[in-house]
Each structure stands twice: as C-alpha cells, then as structure tokens.
Image: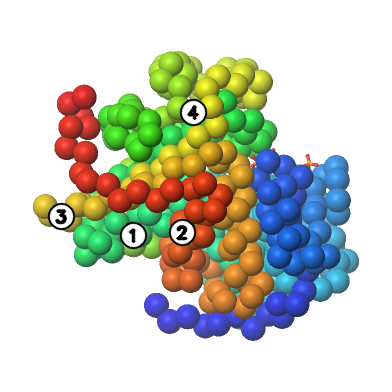
Amino acid sequence: MIFRWSVTTTNGRVLVVGGHGAVGSVVTAALDRWFPRRVLTAGRSRGVRMDVTDPDGFRRTLDGLDDIAAVVLCVQPPDAGPARACLERGIHLVDVNAQPALLAEVSRLDGAAAAAGATAVLSVGIAPGLTNLLARRAHDVVGGAERLELTVLLGAGERHGADAVRWTVEALATPPGAARPRRVALPGHGRRRAHPFPFSDQHTLPETLGVPEVTTRLCLDSRALTRVLFALRPATRRPGLRRALAAALRHTHLGGDPFAVRADAWRGDRHAAFALTGRTQSRISGLVAAHTARRALDGRLPAGVHHIEQVPVLADLPECLAPEGVTLHTLPEDRARDRA
Ligand SMILES: NC(=O)c1ccc[n+]([C@@H]2O[C@H](COP(=O)([O-])OP(=O)(O)OC[C@H]3O[C@@H](n4cnc5c(N)ncnc54)[C@H](OP(=O)(O)O)[C@@H]3O)[C@@H](O)[C@H]2O)c1
C-alpha cells in the first residue's frame, strides 16, 4: 500500500463527540492531559451541542468552530454523514463505531479524505480495535492466515455505556450464521464457551488482511450470564424483549469488570495466538481512541480511510497500554478447546 501523508495542521483543537459518555469521557481526559486547552466535548445535552442524527446541524456546528484538527466520534451515527463532514473539511477522524455497514460506508470516503489530506482511523477500541491488531500479529506470524478466530470476553459487572449496551443487544438479535460456539482458553479465565457474535472485525479483516475465513465469538466473565444471554438470543428478534434486555443489562451488574481478547491464526499446520487481558473495556476502548487521535494530531498517520490494523505506527498500541494494566500474552494452540 502506498501512503500519502496527512498535511492537515496539527496545532488545532480536537472535538470529542459523545465526550461525556463511558468511552468519550476517557478520550477527553487523556487528550486533555496531552493537549491542554485544545480539547472540546460535544453531545446533545452537554459541551458543544451537536446531534449526529442531524447532518445539517452537525455541519453547521462544525463550521462554527475554529481550528478543529480532529474529531473523535464516540457515539454511533445513523450513517456516514458526520464522517463525510469531517473528512471533506480536512479534519482527521477517529471512529469507535462497531457497526459493519456503517464502517463500509465510511471506508468509501477514502478518496475524499485523501484529497483533503485528512486521515480517518476506523475499528478503534477493543472489538473492533485490539482484536484487529492481534489478528494482524497472528496473521503475520503464520505468513498470511487462511483462517482467523477471535474471542472476546467482557465483564458483566462493568457499567457499560447506554450506546454500547444498545449496540450489543441489537447485535444479539442478528442471526448468528453458520459458525458454532467454541470453548476457548482465555488467560486468567480458564476455558470459556464463546458464541459467534457479529463484531465488525470479522467483516472487515477478510478485506484488509485478505483472510478468507474470520469468526468472532463473545462470552461474559459470568458463565451463568453467558448462558442466559445466549439462551435469550432467539427471542431478541422481538423489539420489546430487546428494550427490556437493554434496561436489565444497564442496571444489573453481576460479575466483575475484566476483559480479554484472543486472536488465533492458522495457515496449514502453522498456528499463532495472542491475547490481551485487562480491566474496564470502556476505559481501554477510550485509551485506544485517545492514543490514535494523539498520533493523528502529531501528523504521524497517512491520509485516507484506514482500519487500525492497516496503519503501521498503530501496531504498538497493545504495548502502549501496559501501564494501564493491559497484559499481552503469546499463547500455544488450545488443542483441547472443543473437547473440554
Ligand atoms: N470499538 C469498541 O471496542 C467499542 C467499545 C465500547 C463502545 N464502543 C462504541 O462507542 C460508542 C459509545 O459507547 P459508550 O459506552 O461510551 O456510550 P454512552 O456512555 O452512552 O455515551 C454516548 C455519548 O454520546 C452522546 N450522544 C448520544 N446520542 C448522541 C447523538 N445523537 N448526537 C451526539 N451525541 C450523542 C451522549 O451524550 P448526550 O446524551 O448528551 O448526547 C453520550 O455522551 C458506541 O457506539 C459503542 O458501540 C465501541
């Protein structure tokens, strides 16, 4: 891939949309430490008033703000309108969204972003995000994977943000396809039954890495809640049940706040696997976004639209998170996983 380097000024300010949410507040705090007095927050009710569902209003508000060099989008918009507004103005974009169709739509803005000298980084967070980076490592170790399997464990006791819970419940209602649940060993959590789940990484990695078969699975730290959640899956096609489940997940905190992600790659008889473990997915997702925005503001990212694993200078993010209690594990193949 040939990179054209961004030319946008890096002295400007950064706008964190959804900057008071579970992810956005972490992004705001980290960027404020690195770029004092250069960080603005936005949302419908606090900070700069912006609504991502109102494209004209979003553009008008952006045009009314001086010297915005980067936007970190910490809420899921209905379409690529906010991304287009930023990139056409030469404003860098860091997007934590996890919705495959929306990511595909934003990817199509590559030409507009490159022409304006702006960078967009997509698949930023834990899943997608750290899963993509681990997948890339394992893929490289085996010399180009033929198959990738990703596993995500989330803490059922964490106070996940409303927007993230809404995304999870909607994703649960998506038919799981042909992939089967699997037992997978996760460092510190033993062997867990994880269920196919429509994280966006498995939709974008076939294109960015050229791997034909990618599956992502989910489990919770609480084995009991994992069983209940996936037993309810067929019933989540009913909107009423989705609303009730979202309310229950927001107010029930059974379990702790750990997370773990694991990526396995196979090519013939070659295998490689890496995992990351830590606490509080919202905090670590926010820190991944903040480090990405920092490098955009430092002028270190190529112009155009990229997923996180396509940008070489972001490959060391797992190591950057070590001071935040995130541990990188190199793992042997879990040959017993389906027999357990
Ligand atoms: N990639 C990953 O691993 C990862 C991990 C976690 C979360 N996420 C994604 O990150 C997003 C945020 O999650 P979260 O847990 O931080 O949710 P959250 O706590 O509910 O925060 C959402 C924020 O967005 C604002 N907001 C909501 N609707 C808005 C709108 N229409 N226009 C402008 N601002 C709006 C809210 O403030 P107001 O109510 O004041 O507007 C709030 O500050 C979700 O889309 C989630 O899927 C990704």
At 57% across and 26% down in the image, what residue appears?
157
The label number, if any, that marks residue 319 in the structure image: 2
Residue lying at 43% horizontally and 81% vertically, measured from the top left:
2
**Label 2 or label 3, whichever comes before in sequence order:** 3
Which circle, 4 or 3, is nearer the viewer?
A: 3
Q: SS class of the residue under badge 3? A: strand
State the SS at label 4: loop
Spot occupied by residue 21 in the image (x, y as percentages of width and height) = 72, 42
Please tell me how crowded label 2 is: few (under 14), some (14-19), or many (20+) other residues with Cα within 10 Å: few
Q: Which mark is residue 137?
A: 1
283 relative position to 330: left or right: right
Dot 2: element: helix
Q: Which residue is mark 4?
A: 173
How far across and how far down the image is residue 105, in percent?
Answer: 55, 57
Give above or below for 239 relative to 257.
above
- 242, 40: nearer the viewer: 40
Q: In terms of image quadrants, where is residue 69? A: bottom right
In the foreground, 28 or 121: 28
CA neighbours of label 4 inside 10 A, class few (<14), some (14 to 19), many (20+) = some
Counting from the top left corner in percent of width and height, residue 158 is at 59, 30
Q: Is residue 331 left or right of residue 157?
A: left
Q: Is the residue at mark 2 in contact range of ligand 1, meaning its CB lies under 8 Å from it?
A: no
